[in-house]
Amino acid sequence: MQRVSSQLTIFLRIALPTIWLTTILSIVILLSWAVRGKAGLFGNPFIWIGLLLILGTGFAFIKLVLWKFYRVDMDSRYIYVSNYFKTYKYPFSEIESISDSKTLPGRVYLITLKAKGSFGKKIYFLAAQVLWQDFQKENPNLIEIKSSK
């Protein structure tokens, strides 16, 4: 089994959302503690709307962009997909296609399954370019990449 996804995946999927949430909540708690009703900071609806906007866009970005990336390992028979809590293996016979993404060509890839799997039908991964190219050279007949161009 050979890892083909980037080590940056764990940072984008787990560390960055945790750091963001901790920072935002710490700022809100420190502001409310420092002001303590002196300035009526949280009585102002614009402050609440701004905080909700920051929290909402942050959660939307994390959910729609960062949590789409999975760790992917491959061997000659299976693709192993992990969200760092659970790992599922799919035989290559269940893979419909592996295509280059339109967002970052040559870096982000989309695995499309024939039937819906545990993580859905579409699985995105951020490829470690050297590991991905090594796997393709070692298994030339196994993977056919569809280009987004």
Image (cartoon, rainbow, N blue to C red):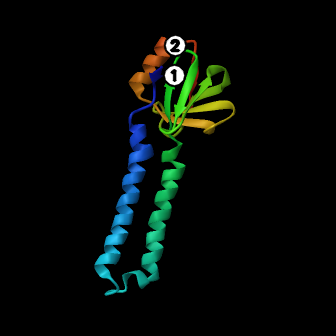
* 59 is higher (above) or lower (below) than 13: below
| Residue 149 in sight here | no
Front-most of residues 122 and 104: 122
Q: Who's the residue at 62% across and 37% down the image?
A: 122
Tell me, for residue 99, which label it has, or none.
none
Choose mark 2 or mark 1, whichever is in front: 1
* Mark 2, residue position: 139
**Amino acid type of the residue tagged 2 in the rendering:** Asn
Q: Image point 65% across, 31% down: which residue? A: 113
Total of numbered circles in the picture? 2
Give the quarter of the figure containing the C terminus.
Answer: top right
Residue 3's spot in the image, x, y percent? Answer: 44, 25
Vertical order, 68 against 129 (above or below) = below
Name the kind of residue labelled 1 in the image: Met
- Which of the numbered marks, if any, corresponds to residue 74? 1
| Residue at horizontal 41 percent and vertical 23 percent from the top | 131
Furthest-left residue in this view: 34
Tell me, yes or no, whether the two marked residues, 2 and 1, touch with CB atoms within 8 Å: yes
Residue 121 on image: x %, y %: 65, 36
> How far separated are the C-alphas under marks 2 and 1?
10 Å
Q: How many residues crowd around disc 2 within 10 Å: few (fewer than 14), some, or many (20 or more)?
A: few
Can residue 99 be seen here? yes
Q: Is residue 102 left or right of residue 25?
A: right
Please state if 91 lies on the left or on the right of 31 as rendered. Answer: right
Which residue, as the protein is rendered here, is positioned at the far right?
115
x and y, in percent, of residue 136 in the image:
49, 17
Q: Residues within 10 Å of mark 1 (few under 14, many from 20)?
A: many
The kind of secondary structure element at disc 2 is loop
Query: First in sequence: mark 2 or mark 1?
Result: 1
Helix, strand or loop at disc 1?
strand
